[in-house]
Image: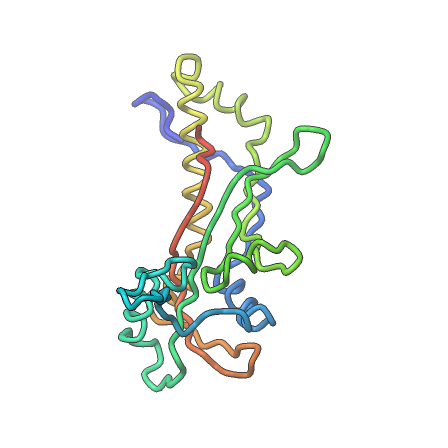
Amino acid sequence: MPSGSSHVPSQTFPIPGLWYRRIIDLIKEAFESPISLWFHLLLFKLFQKHPYGEDNKRIYSEMYDSDIFLEEHDKVQRASTGDPYCKQEKVVAALIFWSDATHLATFGTAKLWLIYMLFGNLSKYIQCQPNLGVTKHLAYIPPFPNLLQDQLKGFHHKWKSQQRDILAFCHCKLMYEVWKLLLDDDFLHTFHSGMVVHCYNGIQQCVYPWIFTYSADYPEK
């Protein structure tokens, strides 16, 4: 946190209570579970056949029949794996992230900022069924401790006039630091070189994670 004064050095303030899981662990967990039987890994385009011989109409209904998914699938087929002797089929794990605040109890003010992870390889009709467990909890970002504002008040030179902007900066910085933990070196290596996963159907595949969408509210606002 910068102090707001050129004569006072910046300072780090701890935000305790972060819980998170590694992205590649959640991907392996999904591909090794019965959920993977519903994954669309061999992509296609969907058309509506016209009954009177006119041009067929392209239908866009899911992420796995979109042009961007087809493009990324083609890129992965041309990509080089970390193991030059790897002969497994290359597939894309289409990652969808979503984050928002949630209250922890019906009564009270306790809340966390959750980051969820879903797979675009699944149909939206499967994803919307909560009892199937296809939505993965990636991270629980804690709220600021009550002590933080008192610490900032005594530290920041312009706290009285810029309190709102300072807290917005803190929220923004916290989200960046959390994503630095989530997008770790193992994920970046897997993103470029893939990872071999023994899937639920008994077949080994080289899985490449790709981030397709991230839907989020902005905590700093």
Check the picture and name the quadrant holding the C terminus: top left
Q: Nearer the viewer, residue 17 or 48?
A: 48
Q: Nearer the viewer, residue 94 or 159?
A: 94
In the rendered structure, the answer to whether residue 43 lies left or right of residue 126 reads left
Q: How many marks?
A: 0
In the rendered structure, the answer to whether residue 15 lies left or right of residue 132 reads left
Q: Is the residue 85 above or below the residue 116 in the image?
A: below
Check the picture and name the quadrant holding the N terminus: top left
Instruction: Give the quadrant of residue 126.
Output: bottom right
Residue 73 image position (x, y, % from top left): 33, 69
Q: Is the residue 158 above or below the residue 60 in the image?
A: above
In the rendered structure, the answer to whether residue 180 lies left or right of residue 112 reads left
* Residue lying farthest to the right in this orientation: 107
Q: Is the residue 3 above or below the residue 17 in the image?
A: above
* Residue lying farthest to the front in this orientation: 52
Instruction: Give the quadrant of residue 144.
Output: top right
Residue 81 image position (x, y, % from top left): 33, 76
Residue 174 image position (x, y, % from top left): 46, 38
Residue at the spot 51% in from the left edge and 54% down from the top edge: 117
Q: Is the residue 99 above or below the residue 150 in the image?
A: below
